[in-house]
Image (cartoon, rainbow, N blue to C red):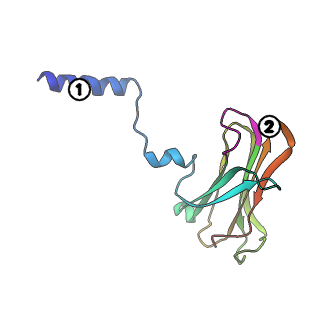
Amino acid sequence: MRKAISVLTAALALIISGFTFAPAASAGTYGCGGSLVDTYDVRTSGGTKYGQVNLYYSTADGGTNCAVTIDTYFGSGVSKDMNVVVVKCVAGSAQGSMCDVGDSRIDRGYYSWYAGPVAVTGTASRCVRVLGYIANPSDSSAYASVATSAAHC
């Protein structure tokens, strides 16, 4: 009986304190739903990798693509100019093309770790493009970027 009361007391204390059990998968998606389908390096013109853009896909809402730009170079305590863009290409766009924009979302600002998430819906039968940008916090004229062609058609 004492053991049962101890277990119930511990459980009640966790509930009262607001402790919650989050699914492990959500910790690595940066607010995007779905599964990671691609990563793109965000590099300077000299080849230095400042970070990456992660692209996620879920079947929700006729297909949803979501993207984030993540700093892996400067560290999460340093604020820097960053952006992420996800583009839904117009119908009929070909894999590898620089497609016309059907819909797009952007997040730009000064962030310490990542920009985004941004998502477009209705992508089940459409190509998407992603763009990412990370500026050097010590020299804003030094930056890294990536702009993909149409993919995941």
Q: Is residue 103 above or below residue 6?
A: below
Which is more toward the observer, 111 or 20?
111
Instruction: Check disc 1 and report its element: helix, strand or loop.
Output: helix
Which quadrant does the N terminus fall into? Answer: top left
Q: Residue at x 69, y 57 (%)?
A: 41
Q: Residue at x 15, y 25 (%)?
A: 3
Q: Residue at x 43, y 41 (%)?
A: 22
Density class for disc 2 (Cα within 10 Å; few <14, some 14-19, many ≥20) is: some
Amino acid tagged 1 = Leu
- For this orientation, the residue located farthest to the right is 141
The numbered dot on residue 137 is 2
The image position of residue 126, as x and y in percent, is 65, 71
Instruction: Check disc 2 and report its element: helix, strand or loop.
Output: loop
The image quarter containing residue 85 is bottom right
User: From which residue to which does the magenta span run?
Assistant: 71-81
Q: Is residue 128 above or below residue 117?
A: below
**In the figure, is residue 13 to the left or right of 83?**
left
Residue that label 1 marks: 8
The image position of residue 109, as x and y in percent, is 76, 40
Which is more toward the observer, 71 or 149?
71
